[in-house]
Amino acid sequence: MEHAFRVELGVAGWRKSSFSDTGGGSCVEVGDGVPVLVFPGGAWAAVVRTA
């Protein structure tokens, strides 16, 4: 069964995580009150390949 839902990401209070690097290549942003992870397709494919 596939579940789909839409979350309005623009309403979240975004902040840069302390886990982000200073060069900007590996940025982690946290959206307060938004229960979702967002990855570009290529990044998610890399995670799945290494799992």
Image (cartoon, rainbow, N blue to C red):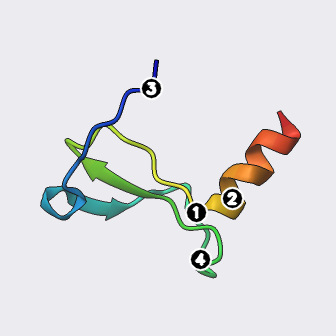
| Image quadrant where residue 23 sits | bottom right
Tag nearer the camera, 3 or 4:
3
* For discs 3 and 1, the disc positioned in front in the rendered view: 3
Q: Tell me how far mark 4 sits from mark 1, CA to CA.
A: 20 Å
Per the image, label 1 sits on a secondary structure element best described as loop
- Whole-number angstrom distance, CA of label 3 to CA of label 4: 38 Å
Q: Which is closer to the viewer, label 4 or label 2?
A: 2
Q: Which residue occupies the foreground of this view, 51 or 27?
A: 51
Helix, strand, or loop for circle 3?
loop
Mark pair 2, 3: CA separation: 22 Å
Amino acid type of disc 3? Answer: Glu
- The residue identified by callout 1 is 40
Marked residue nearer the N-terminal end (4 or 1): 4
> Could you tell me which residue is drawn at 18 percent across and 64 percent down?
10
Q: Which residue is mark 4?
A: 22
Circle 3 residue: 2
Closer to the N terminus: mark 3 or mark 1?
Answer: 3
Question: In the image, what residue type sits under mark 1?
Answer: Pro
Crowd class of label 1 (few under 14; some 14 to 19; many from 20; radius 10 Å)? few
Residue 9 marker: none
Q: Nearer the viewer, mark 4 or mark 1?
A: 1
Badge 2: residue crowd in 10 Å (few <14, some 14–19, many ≥20): few
- Of the numbered discs 3 and 4, the one sitting upstream in the chain is 3
Q: Who comes first in sequence, dot 2 or dot 3?
A: 3
Closer-to-camera residue (32/2): 2
Q: Quadrant of the C terminus?
A: top right
User: Which residue, given by chain and number where applicable, does mark 2 sit on?
Assistant: 43
Tell me whether the residue at label 1 lies in contact with that at label 2, contact meaning CB atoms closer than 8 angstroms: yes
44 lies above or below 15: above
